[in-house]
Image (cartoon, rainbow, N blue to C red):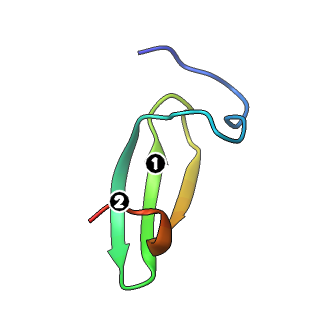
Amino acid sequence: MFKRDEFPEEGELVVCRVKNIQNFGAFVELEEYPGKEAFIHISEVAP
């Protein structure tokens, strides 16, 4: 998998691994961006 140093651009599709799920969203690790983590709000998650 291709590794990058900076953060993705808005609208870019990114492969991620879910680290923690809460009622309000999910915390993920960005696979293509080593050491970078993100939060996905529940309104952005598909059922």
Location of the C terminus (image quadrant)? bottom left
Residue positioned most to the left? 47
Check if mark 2's residue and mark 1's residue have beta carbons within 8 Å.
yes
Residue 5 x, y percent position in the rendering: 69, 26
**Drawn side of residue 33 relative to residue 29, left or right:** right
**Residue 46 image-quadrant placement:** bottom left
Which residue is pictured at 49% across the width and 14% down the height?
2
**Residue 16 image-quadrant placement:** top left
Under mark 2, the amino acid is Lys
Which residue does the numbered mark 1 point to in the structure image?
Answer: 29
Q: Secondary structure at mark 1?
A: strand
Q: Secondary structure at mark 2?
A: strand
Among the two numbered marks 2 and 1 on one chain, the one whose residue lies closer to the N terminus: 2
From this view, report whether residue 21 is shown above or below residue 18: below
Residue 21 x, y percent position in the rendering: 33, 72
Quote the CA–CA distance across marks 2 and 1: 7 Å
Which residue is pictured at 48% across the width and 63% down the height?
44
Foreground residue among 26 and 46: 46
From this view, report whether residue 14 is shown above or below residue 46: above
Which residue does the numbered mark 2 point to in the structure image?
Answer: 19
Which residue is pictured at 52% across the width and 34% down the height?
13
